[in-house]
Image (cartoon, helix red, strand yellow):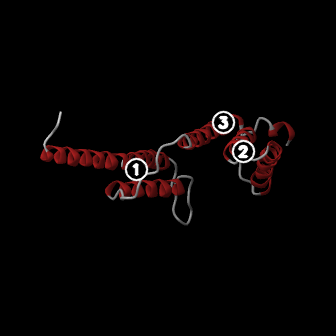
Amino acid sequence: MVSSPVTAIQDVQLKRTDRAGRRIAGRRIAPLVLFALGAVATVGSIRLELGTLQHPEPGLWPLITALTIVFSSIVILVRPGAETLEPWTSKSISVATGVSSLCAFIVLFSLVGFFIPAVLMMLLWLRVYGGESLRTTIILSLAGPLVLYVIFDSLLGVPFPRDLLLGLFL
């Protein structure tokens, strides 16, 4: 079916408007997710003791970080920017798996201690994301968490949860 030139121009303008509307809506998804995460983190940090700037308690710095995330997401929501968005590709999945591995680390850290989750995390990140050789990955994945554990737990006196594996040797 042949349409008139006026109708064709109107159709093109409607398609452009629709695409622009989808682009703007697409730019608001990430800031909305960040806003939600920042709000949850704000509530979680307020539940901890805040203390003062001179004598901070465990919730003060997470609160400042969470409020910064909330404020930044509001700025991005109000002024989304006009730059072209990075297209979603198969590499975009690596971001999701990276965040998932951090969540798994947090859960495992509280259940089995520091060493095993740290080794698993370094194995994943060095081998999969860093593309390191198997030998380098294994050496760094075992040595890194051990050195960090000795520095923080033994030298600096930062208490870690009881570690199932290191508790057998240290």
- Quadrant of the frame with the N terminus: top left
The picture places residue 148, in percent across and down from the top left corner, at 76, 52
> Residue 37: image x %, image y %?
45, 45
Which residue is disc 2 drawn over?
122
Image quadrant where one finds the C terminus? top right
Mark 3 or mark 1, whichever is nearer to me: 1
The residue lying at 46 percent from left, 47 percent from top is 87
C-beta proximity under 8 Å, tags 2 and 1:
no
> Residue 140 versus residue 54: which sits nearer the camera?
140
The foreground one among 25 and 142 is: 25
For mark 3, give the secondary structure.
Answer: helix
**Residue on which the image places disc 1:** 31
Left or right, 13 with reference to 77: left
* Figure disc tally: 3
Provide the residue designation for mark 3: 108
Determine the residue positioned at 42% across, 52% down: 85
Q: Is residue 155 above or below residue 127?
A: below
User: Residue 151 at what x, y percent from top left?
Assistant: 78, 55
Residue drawn at (50%, 56%) of the image: 65
Amino acid type indicated by mark 1: Pro
